[in-house]
């Protein structure tokens, strides 16, 4: 082996330290990008909610079940943002805060179940996860 290929322990340590410093820089950049991505996702959700408010003027009777479920999900999202990431809904929330008293309690619970990703008639024992 030629002498040119020999690397002293001190040189190897310096190379390893520079590599570690670069890795740390990359980890910091990844953390920044992940935080930025989270903020952008929140902004996108807010824009989608604003766009959906354009349709809020339509009468309740003209809304499809998917649109109603979407409105319940939007309401839950807003409540979760205001309450440290969690939201609890009951039929009063859906009936009065989302639909201004239009649907009955049974239909409200159906919409809540659908918004939670459950079957419309799935029995949950009064608790919807």
Image (cartoon, rainbow, N blue to C red):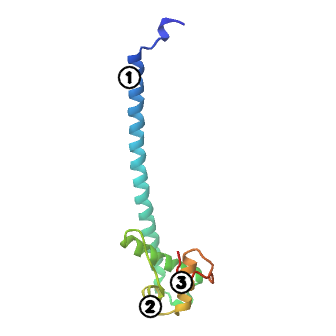
User: Badge 1 is on which residue?
Assistant: 14
Q: Which residue lies at the image location 53% right of the left edge and 83% below the top edge?
A: 126
- Total labels: the figure holds 3
Question: Looking at the image, is mark 1 or mark 3 earlier in the sequence?
Answer: 1
Question: Depth check: 2 or 44 in front?
Answer: 2
User: Badge 3 is on which residue?
Assistant: 126
Q: How far apart, in angstroms, are the residues tagged by discs 2 and 1?
A: 68 Å
User: Badge 2 is on which residue?
Assistant: 100
On the image, the x and y values in percent for residue 33 come to 42, 50
On the image, the x and y values in percent for residue 128 come to 53, 78
Which secondary structure, mark 2?
Answer: loop
Contact between labelled residues 3 and 2, with CB atoms less than 8 Å apart: no
Find residue 32 and name its label: none
Q: Quarter holding the N terminus?
A: top right
Q: Which residue lies at the image location 38% right of the left edge and 17% below the top edge?
A: 10
Contact between labelled residues 1 and 2, with CB atoms less than 8 Å apart: no
Q: Quadrant of residue 9?
A: top left
Give above or below for 22 relative to 120: above
Q: How far apart, in angstroms, are the residues tagged by discs 2 and 3?
A: 23 Å
Tell me the crowding category of disc 3: few under 14, some 14 to 19, or many 20 or more residues within 10 angstroms, Cα based.
few
Judged by depth in the image, the label closer to the viewer, 1 or 3, is 3
């Amino acid at each position: 082996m030629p002498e040119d290929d020999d690397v002293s322990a001190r040189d190897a340590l310096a190379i390893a330290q520079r590599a570690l410093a670069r890795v740390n820089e990359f980890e910091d950049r990844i953390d920044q990008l992940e935080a930025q991505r989270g903020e952008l996702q929140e902004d996108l959700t807010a824009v989608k909610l604003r766009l959906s408010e354009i349709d809020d003027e339509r009468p309740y009777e003209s809304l499809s079940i998917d649109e109603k479920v979407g409105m319940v999900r939007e309401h839950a999202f807003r409540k979760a943002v205001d309450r440290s990431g969690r939201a609890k809904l009951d039929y009063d929330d859906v009936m009065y805060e989302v639909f201004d008293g239009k649907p009955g309690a049974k239909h409200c619970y159906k919409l809540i179940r659908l918004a939670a990703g459950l079957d419309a008639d799935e029995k949950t024992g009064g608790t919807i996860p």
